[in-house]
Amino acid sequence: MAAVSEWRVKLVGRPKDVSCPSVVKTQVIDTGLCCRCMACMAACPAAVRTGVGFDFEERKHVCVDCEICVRVCPRLDYKPLSGIGSYIKAVAGRSKRFKGQDGAMVTEILMSAMEMGIIDRCIFVGRDEDWRTEILHVRDVEQLEVPTLTGTKYTFAAAVPALREAVLNTKVGVGFVGTPCMVSGVRRLQKELAVFRRKVKLVIGLFCTENFYWDELTEFLKERGVDIKKLVKTDITKGKFIATMTDDVVEFPVKELSAIMPSGCRVCTDFSAVESDVSVGSVGSKPGFSTVLVREENAKEVLDFIREHGYADFDEVSLEFVERLCNLKKKREANIK
Amino acid sequence: MGIKRLKMPEYSFGDKVKWHAAAVGTAFKEAFFPHTVTVHYPKERRKFPDNFRGYILFDIEKCINCWQCAFVCPANAIRMKEAPNKKYYPTIDYAKCIFCHFCVDSCVGGALRTTKIHDVAYADVNEMLAETEQLMEPPEIVREDRRYVEYVIEEDDVRLRRVKGQDYLLVEPPPRKEYSMVCVCDDPESCTGCGTCADVCEHYAISISIEGEYKVIRIDTARCTGCGLCVKECPLRVLRLVRREGEQ
Amino acid sequence: MKMLGQILELASSNRVEIPLIEPLLGMLPPPLSELAALPLWKPLFAALVVPGFATLGLLLLLLPWIERKLCARIQWRVGPKEIVSWLGGIIQLLADSLRFLFQEVIVSRDSHRPYFTQFVLLSFIPALLPMLFVAAGTIIAIRTEYSVQIMLALVCLFPVFILGMGWSSGNRFAFVGTVREAFMYFAYEVPLILSVIAMLLVFGTGDPVAIGESGRLGIVLNPLAALVFFIATAMGTSRLPFEIPEADQELAFGPFIEYSGITFGLAYVLAYEKLYVLSALFTTLFLGGGSGPMIAPLGELSGALWFVLKVIVVMVVFAALRAIYPRFRLDQALKAGWSSILAISLLAIIISSVEVVMWA
């Protein structure tokens, strides 16, 4: 990069007396399109300086008019992505080293990438005993001894703002895992800000139908007789939500959860995270295995590394299940107004 | 296991006589031509080198309130006191000061400097706390000396040489190599245009203007002092300090 | 009145002859001149002036200063110089004595009070009595053939008083110093006596005036005896290398540790008095007493002057030893005293006997 004393930033072009938070608020949040990816929070300089949260009403007071929130929001000028997306390779994997939701392939891919030296840290989502999400910057395999780090949480987590922190401190590169909306947010960040392009080296997308707000989900589960403090694993598989506790299991059809589906998920059509470097999910492979859709060259190198070192077992995938769910989610296009 | 009994080494009678004679001879020689190395303070003063670690003086113009002297002092002798202009300046407690001069070494602006004064007397321990105003002037000392003494070292012998006159006590600090730094943008493609840098710059060196479709950010290198505040405050760390061109 | 007349008659018979002050006395009319000449009566003069009090006092004021300055010079230092700087601090001892006079004398509770306070003063007995028997040239108080022997006997009394002073202090460091003094006494006594015997054999008499007038230098006649006497003196007066009872670095002044104020001053000068007595003996036996070229106007005082100068030289040599030698260990000193030095002293006696036979 050349060091310059003069440079310019392209303006977005919005009406003169409308503030950026207003633009975002009116066009994205109030319309119900906001997917809670938090890419705007990751980029906002006022959030760094003043610590203001996700409240756009409050944000108006500290906004410095930089327009970055408008530029990185994936739901502004929303062009919904869908389908299974392009991929180099599709395989089912089960990690020999780690235990996760299914085959722990997300953990395996990130740890192998760290071993290869592509990245030196990655963003993990952990939880406390009430199943509130917590973000952890993992820099060493030893940190994974905390068992709550792996496994799906089914609630929103502020992983993208944490990514900003990691990007500014890393010397090698950062690995990221998130839902398709978060992946889109990261890709927008990479498009607008060069530092994210340079430093985010591996983006893993998860297969996602919807996510939930923590308070609504825990309320819902409590009504169904689930004791959050004893909850060990949550799983959505074969149309059922299975909550495993230390001494009991509660099951109910997933359809019942549509009562608390967030509005941002209702308009989302991306099931398989088409913008990621590699997508991972449980659909399409045997129990205990994870489906891995390798989309980009960098992810392929990691998978080759895993294969060479024998860190995981591999098996066949049945992609028709994946495609079916993609088509199902594509129908949500109708919800976009 | 045996215990070894040490025996005194045997010396011949002739050796012993020789050594006795040598000892008495040295005493004779020294009695008539002594190598006295006493310096008759206060009539004479020993000449110290310029970097002697003596009383510390303070130049208020150069102080930038960085508090490094207070942080580094191993004896906790330096306390920062607030001045009427809301800035903090050091006060040195000479009862605690060990004259290590870490503070002089660590002073960023070169405000603390050393002198060759080492013999200030106080009537009371409380007097030993030197306030900032006291530190700015050299202390009152009575010069009783009429000569100063230099050590002349020749091979394996050391002599004293007495020179008439008084040795100077205040020393000019050596010229400091100061580099000018200036702020530049390392990564303009990561700039969000938030204007934090322009906000925090105390010298109004960064300006942001809207020209057509673009927000243009300019750093006025003539105004920039290289303080580094914008570098620290930029949320995406796109700014960096570099050495100014053309300076040694 | 008759008694006065008798005293004056006695005094004028045995008078010190000093041609210098004769005319002064002549100026005064009798009987005033007789009264003025009273101090010149030899015994009184000897006891008071030379080699008695006045000389002793002067030397006590002068010698520690010489010792300190000389040792300092050899040790690359300067010594005392502040009291009267342009004189080089020569009245340092006077200042010290004045200070001692004003300092409080502390008598410790553990000490045996009578002996503690009295022995300090009683110790002057063996210090001052020998003065009566020393001949400064021809000035002598009591002239007998046995002067040297009596002086020796009195000198041998010294350690008794030191032991008394140390023991009555009731302090364990004083005790250690006292015991060491006793050991040292044990070590040097016999060689000292033997060397004096050796010289008495050669001279044939113990009369110091006769020894002085015989014109023979003892150091030439019997150098071994001189050596033994020298070393024994060093041992006896606690001079380095035999400063064992006092050992500043170990015992902080040994037997005299509990004394403060004027008693300290007296204890301090005790060693110098003993040194003076032994140096006077050394000068008499080995350096020819008061012999030297006659300075006419001084009359008998010239002999005394030479005597005092020689004594000063001897004492300065002892003082300079301090800067040259390190300290002996107690057992090493004892061993030396009873093996090598005893052997040399016996050898000295043999040499003396041989000389006597040869020049019989």
Image (cartoon, coloured by chain):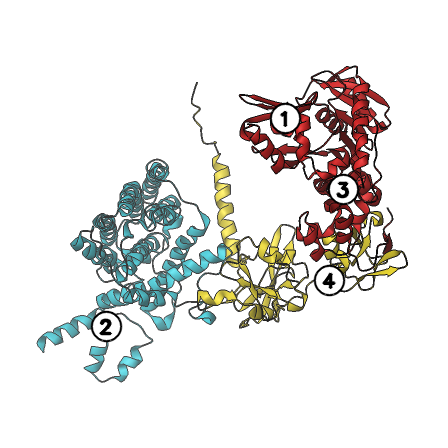
Q: Quadrant location of residue B138?
A: bottom right
Q: Is residue C353 left or right of residue A289?
A: left
Residue type, label 4: Pro
**Residue C69, numbered circle:** none
Same subunit under labels 2 and 1?
no
Tell me where residue A321 appears, x and y as whole percent: 79, 20
Disc 4 and disc 2 in contact, CB within 8 angstroms: no
Q: How crowded is mark 2: few (under 14 residues within 10 Å), some or many (20 or more)?
A: some
Q: Position of residue C104 (x, y in %)?
A: 26, 63
Q: Chain A is drawn in which colour?
A: red
Instruction: Say which mark, if any, is on residue C39.
Output: 2
Residue at the spot of label 1: A234
How far apart marks 4 and 2 lie (CA) works out to 81 Å
Which tint was used for chain C? cyan
| Disc 3, SS | loop
Residue type at mark 3 is: Leu
Q: Is residue C222 above or below residue B135?
A: above
- Residue that mark 3 sits on: A33
Residue tagged by mark 4?
Answer: B175
Q: The yellow chain is which one?
A: B
Cα distance in 3D space between marks 2 and 1: 128 Å
Viewer-side label of 2, 1: 1
Residue situated in front as seen by the camera: A4 or A231? A231
- Mark nearest the camera among 1 and 3 is 3
- Mark 1 or 4: in front is 1
SS of the residue under disc 4: loop
| Chain bearing mark 2 | C
Q: Which residue is drawn at 80% across and 23% down?
A: A324
Q: Mark 3 vs mark 4: tell me if same chain.
A: no
Q: What residue type is labelled 2?
A: Pro
